[in-house]
């Protein structure tokens, strides 16, 4: 029996509640399809930071370097500044393992009403491809003259040709396999160096993908169009910051950020890729057993696709769609009263 080794990092808040749900679903479909998932449970979290001064051990990256995949719950909790928690765990994993693609599918599912009237099931199905390793989230910069009237903070944005070209090639290739349409998020009317460079490379890479129809939209107008006409989009590609913001907006359009999945991919396969729900640690509801596990379960299905088990991933998503379309089982964020365990138990009943 083939085995896959998965690093399990529940993290903080509701991450410790939704990851067990995803694991139960994974184990069920793995058994049905004749393979096994072997988990290494890791306590890397804000709780660990408060106890030891570090989100993960010094050799943490080496411990998971040879895993087949990483499944993460959430990062961040009150009492630990966000830049400490993210730069102590999530971002080092993304960058050390060259996970330069952040992939976030957006789908309006039958049975999950969207707050947007024009976002209808069967019509809204697109993917945000976010550059995940450079851009606006660089480490270059600093603060000087702290505490004085002239205190100054400087943050440098870094776009490299290799970094932009590889994310564009991934997005164009994905569009070619999907609906053949790509939209590039830009702001070259206001950002004078990096965004014109981005636009130039989009046009250059488009020449190598003649089967894909493409356009570009300024980020402010694009945000409005995602709300006003979400069905028009197929693949949206954006920088680290733009992709981050657009994918959260789009998840809300789909009905709840609680259902949104994501993948941090090294498409070369040289390093493990990481899968995580978008929703964050949600400390306001942590420990109550009411968190929506769908984002984690959907992320786990994406992990199965990445591991070369698309039939198992498809089975998970078919069960999710059936549950939402044919039953009244809903977590609180979707207008229901089912708890995390209730939703998971009902989903497991639809799996063989």
Image (cartoon, rainbow, N blue to C red):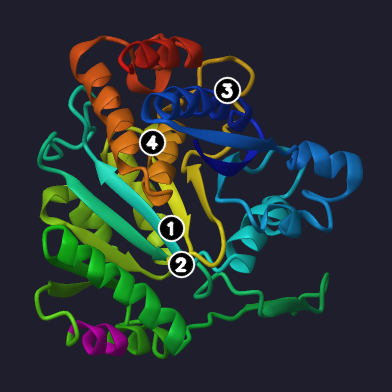
* Mark earlier in primary sequence (2, 4): 2
Q: Which residue is mark 1?
A: 244
Q: Residues within 10 Å of mark 2 (few under 14, many from 20)?
A: many
Residue at screen point 73% across, 77% down: 142
Q: Which residue is mark 2?
A: 240
Locate residue 321: give its quadrant. Answer: top left
Residue at screen point 44% across, 38% down: 300
* Mark earlier in primary sequence (4, 1): 1
In magenta, the rendered stretch is 200-206
Asked if the residue under mark 1 is in contact with the one under mark 2, i.e. CB atoms within 8 Å, the reply is: yes
| In magenta stretch: residue 202 | yes
Pick the front one: 156 or 237: 237
The rendered magenta stretch, by its main secondary structure, is classed as helix
Image x and y of residue 222, in percent: 24, 62
Q: Residues within 10 Å of mark 1 (few under 14, many from 20)?
A: some
Residue at screen point 79% across, 36% down: 47
Image x and y of residue 112, in percent: 24, 26
| Nearer the camera: disc 2 or disc 3 | 2
* Mark earlier in primary sequence (3, 1): 1
Q: Is residue 267 above or below residue 187?
A: above
Q: Which residue is mark 4?
A: 298
Q: Is residue 96 above or below residue 40?
A: below
| Nearer the camera: disc 2 or disc 4 | 4
Which corner quadrant holds the C terminus? top left
* Mark earlier in primary sequence (2, 3): 2
Mark-to-mark CA distance, 3 and 1 = 23 Å
Callout 3 secondary element: loop
* Mark earlier in primary sequence (3, 4): 3
Q: Which mark is residue 285?
A: 3
Residue 64 visible, this angle: yes
Image x and y of residue 347, in percent: 36, 16
């Amino acid at each position: 029996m083939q085995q896959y080794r998965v690093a399990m990092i529940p993290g903080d808040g509701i991450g410790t509640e939704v990851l067990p749900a995803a694991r139960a679903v994974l184990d069920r479909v793995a058994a049905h399809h004749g393979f096994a998932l072997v988990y290494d449970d890791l306590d890397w979290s804000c709780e660990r930071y408060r106890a030891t001064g570090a989100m993960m051990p010094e050799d943490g990256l080496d411990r998971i370097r040879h895993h087949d995949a990483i499944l993460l719950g959430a990062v961040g909790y009150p009492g630990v500044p966000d830049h400490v928690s993210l730069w102590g765990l999530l971002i080092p994993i993304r960058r050390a393992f060259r996970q330069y693609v952040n992939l976030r599918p957006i789908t309006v599912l039958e049975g999950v009403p969207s707050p947007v009237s024009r976002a209808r099931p069967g019509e809204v199905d697109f993917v945000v491809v976010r550059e995940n390793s450079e851009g606006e989230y660089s480490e270059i910069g600093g603060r000087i003259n702290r505490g004085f009237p002239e205190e100054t903070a400087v943050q440098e944005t870094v776009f490299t040709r290799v970094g932009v070209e590889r994310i564009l090639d991934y997005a164009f290739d994905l569009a070619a396999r999907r609906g053949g349409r790509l939209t590039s998020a830009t702001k070259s009317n206001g950002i004078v160096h990096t965004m014109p460079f981005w636009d130039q490379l989009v046009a250059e890479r488009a020449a190598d993908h003649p089967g894909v129809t493409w356009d570009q939209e300024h980020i402010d107008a694009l945000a409005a169009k995602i709300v006003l006409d979400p069905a028009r989009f197929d693949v949206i590609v954006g920088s680290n910051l733009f992709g981050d913001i657009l994918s959260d907006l789009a998840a809300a359009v789909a009905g709840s950020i609680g259902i949104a999945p994501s993948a941090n991919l090294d498409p070369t396969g040289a390093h493990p890729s990481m899968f995580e729900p978008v929703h964050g640690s949600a400390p306001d509801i942590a420990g109550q057993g009411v968190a929506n596990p769908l984002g984690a379960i959907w992320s786990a299905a994406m992990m199965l696709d990445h591991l070369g088990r698309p039939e198992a991933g498809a089975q998970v998503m078919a069960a999710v769609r059936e549950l939402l379309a044919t039953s009244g089982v809903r977590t609180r964020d979707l207008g229901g009263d089912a708890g995390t365990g209730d939703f998971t138990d009902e989903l497991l009943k639809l799996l063989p």
